[in-house]
Every structure is written in C-alpha cells, then in structure tokens.
Amino acid sequence: MTQATATQTQEKGILMTDTALKHVLELREKQGKDLCLRVGVRGGGCSGMSYTMDFEDPNNIQESDQVFDYDEGFKVVSDPKSMLYIYGLVLDYSEDLIGGGFQFTNPNATQTCGCGTSFSA
C-alpha cells in the first residue's frame, strides 16, 4: 500500500493514498462534472457487509453526512451509519493486472473476504 498524502491527517475518517486520489480524480474528470465521492457500506457480500463507492452531486450532501476535503476541493462523503463501520478506512488503488483496482483497508473489520470488497465488523 502506498503512503497517504500529506493532506490526509489523522483527523480524516476516510484516508486516500496518492494513487487512489489520482485515479478517482481522473474518473471524475471523465464524468465532466464537479462531483464528490460517496463511500459507505450496505448489508451483503460474502462477509456480511459490502463497501459502496460512487460519484455524487455535492448538492446531495446531507447535513448529517461527514465530509472530508482533499486536493483541488475534492470531497469524500459518508453517512453517519457507514462511518460506524469504516472510520479510519484507507482507500488505495493498484494497477496490477491481477488483484488490481480499489483496495480497502479497514481497521474495524474483524474478517475480510478474499474479494476484498466485503467484511464483517
């Protein structure tokens, strides 16, 4: 896993490595809109909970959401219920041919499945 950026202090509940942030910003640019990234969890997956991640219009941010600011005004958003399970999450990205893509390192997970996208806490 690569090192988290200098702007990612311990105060952030969701950390992104430089590689993940770069890739997310490239994906957002392809959308052609000023979007934020919503990260959360939902029930399901082989370990009980699955990570969710999608772009969203910043106008949809709720007052109860936790918002984390990154480079270039980019925001990562999560709802309070998800934050109970993912606070301290590190989001990384790998370009490896096998096992590449977004990778989640969750300090709250007691068990993680082999696919890396579901966990139990």
Image (cartoon, grey):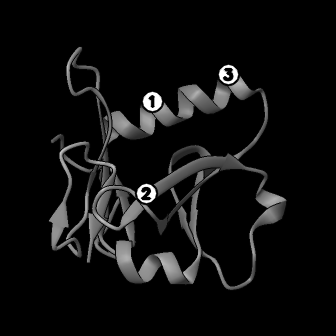
Q: Nearer the viewer, mark 2 or mark 1?
A: 2
> Which circle's residue, 2 or 1, is located before the other in the chain?
1
- Above or below, 66 relative to 27: below
Residue 76 vs residue 79, the one in the foreground: 79
- Measuring 51% from the left and 36% from the top, which residue is drawn there? 24
The front one of 11 and 35 is: 35
In the rendered view of the protein, which quadrant contains the C terminus? bottom left
Which label sits on residue 51? 2
Residue 87 to residue 2: above or below: below
Q: Residue 120's quadrant in the figure?
A: bottom left
SS type, badge 2: strand
Residue 23, numbered label:
1
The amino acid on which the numbered mark 3 sits, given as a three-letter code, is: Lys
Q: Which residue does the image show at 22% across and 71% down from the upper left? A: 109
For residue 71, above or below residue 112 = above
Q: Secondary structure at mark 1?
A: helix
Badge 3 marks a residue whose secondary structure is helix
x, y percent for residue 90:
29, 57
- Residue 66 place in picture, x, y as percent: 57, 76
Which quadrant is home to the N terminus?
top left
Closer to the camera, 89 or 21? 89
Amino acid identity at mark 1: His
Q: CA distance from mark 3 to mark 1?
A: 11 Å
- Quadrant of the image occupied by residue 112: bottom left
Which residue is pictured at 51% across the width and 47% down the height? 71
Can you give x and y, in whole percent of width and height, for residue 52 in the image? 51, 55
Viewer-side label of 3, 2? 2
Nearest the viewer among 103 and 119 is 119
Mark 1 burial class by Cα count in 10 Å: few <14, some 14-19, many 20+: some
Please name the residue shown 22% across and 19% down the image. 96
- Per the image, the residue denoted by label 3 is 30
At label 2, the amino acid type is: Tyr
